[in-house]
């Protein structure tokens, strides 16, 4: 009887926490977005609460925890640059975190003092994840109960991962454990997995990564290889913007990776990093085409079929992107020697991908035109 009662108590407490998290998330959504308890893409999600035009900012939020990239030369608090003719001021104790002003340093000290002593002992490559984990572990003490519940509500980040990926995450959790509060060290793996699945790379205006942050509300946005939204940043603030008209009730989606990857590359990376097989419309089109082995030209199939003769990597129809992304620049330039059929395919693919790659459409067409010159 005692066991049954305890089970019911835990279930009731979880239900209360879930309700509190849902209420916390719902209150932060604004007029353009509503919560989806069950997404067609799996798990929870966000949907448009009304018809929305392209270019509309439907969500803005600040991170619960964030860490600047050391090489970015940014303030550890506001992610801003130092004033002209001045340099960032390093913490005099750990000499790891830097600040643009004494005000930012004073604001950060109540949080930073718990990690300051141990931070220099963490390997440089692990410091960002260590900072995020340490501050996330302390969020229950420094944030409201509703905020803590919303963090607990995020996906665990372990479902669907293979043994290799789990081993990598476990090794990371063991390396950063010394920086965590003693009561949180047993949960190091859970923290690392949750951060790995839900953090965003924070970028500057030129889309260069300057840090990472956990945005519980934005983390509910699911992936699609044909997304209707993109994420941008102003300082630490995240903005979710539509890239095409969205109807009321349509789920809002972003791409978790480079949409210029081939279907096989995208699906493999999503499975390895996030533990799921993508089932978006673009991937279904590709899979259906493979199963039928006939019918209209499938852009993803052709994208994977055209390969560099030197390095063997697929050649993107956006040649500039391909040359930046691939290790073999000289070999990829041999795409200029493709037969006329392939050149026609490249031009056709620019049209087929115009909706999913709206922001790069002009560059794609220009790249295809250069190949046919």
Image: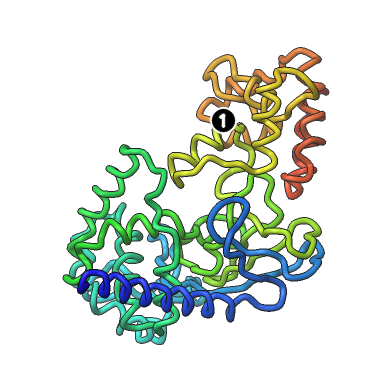
Residue drawn 31% across the image and 44% down it: 166
| 246 to the left or right of 266 | right
The coloring applied to the image is rainbow
Residue drawn 20% across the image and 74% down it: 2
91, 132: nearer the viewer? 132
Q: Position of residue 22 (x, y in %)?
A: 52, 75
Q: Position of residue 153 (x, y in %)?
A: 44, 67
Quarter holding residue 308: top right
254, 354: nearer the viewer? 254
Q: Can see residue 87? A: no
| 302 to the left or right of 209 | right
Name the quadrant of the C terminus: top right
Quarter holding residue 353: top right
Name the quadrant of the N terminus: bottom left
Residue drawn 77% across the image and 31% down it: 349
Which residue is identified by label 1? 264
Quarter holding residue 357: top right
Q: Is residue 289 above or below residue 260?
A: above
Residue drawn 34% across the image and 83% down it: 142
Q: Secondary structure at mark 1?
A: helix
| 341 to the left or right of 196 | right
Q: Position of residue 314 (x, y in %)?
A: 60, 25
Residue placed furthest toward the front: 1
Q: Can see residue 25? A: yes
213, 149: nearer the viewer? 149
Label 1: how many Cα within 10 Å (few below 14, some 14–19, many 20+): some
87, 162: nearer the viewer? 162
Q: Position of residue 18 (x, y in %)?
A: 45, 73
Q: Is residue 306 above or below residue 163?
A: above
């Amino acid at each position: 009887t005692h066991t049954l009662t305890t089970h019911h108590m835990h279930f009731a407490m979880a239900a209360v926490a879930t309700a509190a998290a849902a209420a916390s998330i719902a209150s932060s959504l604004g007029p353009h977005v509503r919560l989806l308890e069950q997404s067609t893409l799996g798990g929870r999600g966000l949907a448009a609460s009304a018809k929305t035009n392209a270019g509309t900012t439907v969500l803005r939020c600040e991170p619960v925890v964030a860490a600047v990239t050391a090489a970015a030369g940014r303030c550890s608090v506001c992610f801003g640059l130092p004033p002209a003719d001045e340099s960032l001021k390093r913490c005099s104790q750990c000499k790891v975190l830097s600040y643009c002003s004494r005000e930012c340093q004073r604001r950060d000290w109540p949080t930073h003092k718990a990690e300051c002593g141990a931070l220099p002992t963490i390997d440089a490559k692990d410091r960002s994840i260590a900072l995020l984990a340490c501050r996330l572990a302390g969020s229950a003490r420094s944030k409201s109960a509703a905020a803590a519940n919303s963090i607990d509500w995020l996906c665990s980040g372990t479902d669907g991962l293979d043994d290799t990926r789990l081993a990598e995450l476990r090794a990371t959790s063991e390396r950063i454990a010394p920086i965590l509060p003693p009561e949180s060290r047993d949960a190091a793996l859970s923290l690392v997995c949750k951060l790995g699945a839900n953090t965003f790379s924070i970028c500057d205006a030129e889309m260069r990564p300057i840090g990472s942050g956990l945005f519980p509300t934005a983390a509910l946005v699911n992936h699609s290889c044909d997304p209707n939204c993109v994420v941008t940043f102003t300082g630490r603030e995240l903005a979710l913007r539509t890239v095409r008209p969205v109807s009321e009730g349509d789920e809002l989606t972003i791409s978790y990776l480079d949409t210029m990857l081939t279907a096989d590359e995208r699906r493999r990376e999503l499975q390895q990093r996030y533990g799921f097989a993508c089932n978006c419309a673009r991937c279904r089109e590709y899979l259906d085409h493979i199963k039928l082995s006939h019918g209209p030209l499938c852009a993803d199939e052709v994208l994977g079929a055209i390969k560099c003769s030197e390095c063997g990597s697929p050649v993107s129809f956006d040649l500039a992107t391909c040359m930046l992304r691939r290790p073999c620049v000289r070999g990829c330039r041999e795409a200029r020697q493709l037969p006329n059929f392939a050149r026609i395919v490249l031009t056709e693919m620019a049209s087929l991908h115009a909706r999913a790659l709206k922001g790069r459409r002009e560059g794609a067409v220009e790249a295809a035109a250069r190949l046919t010159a």
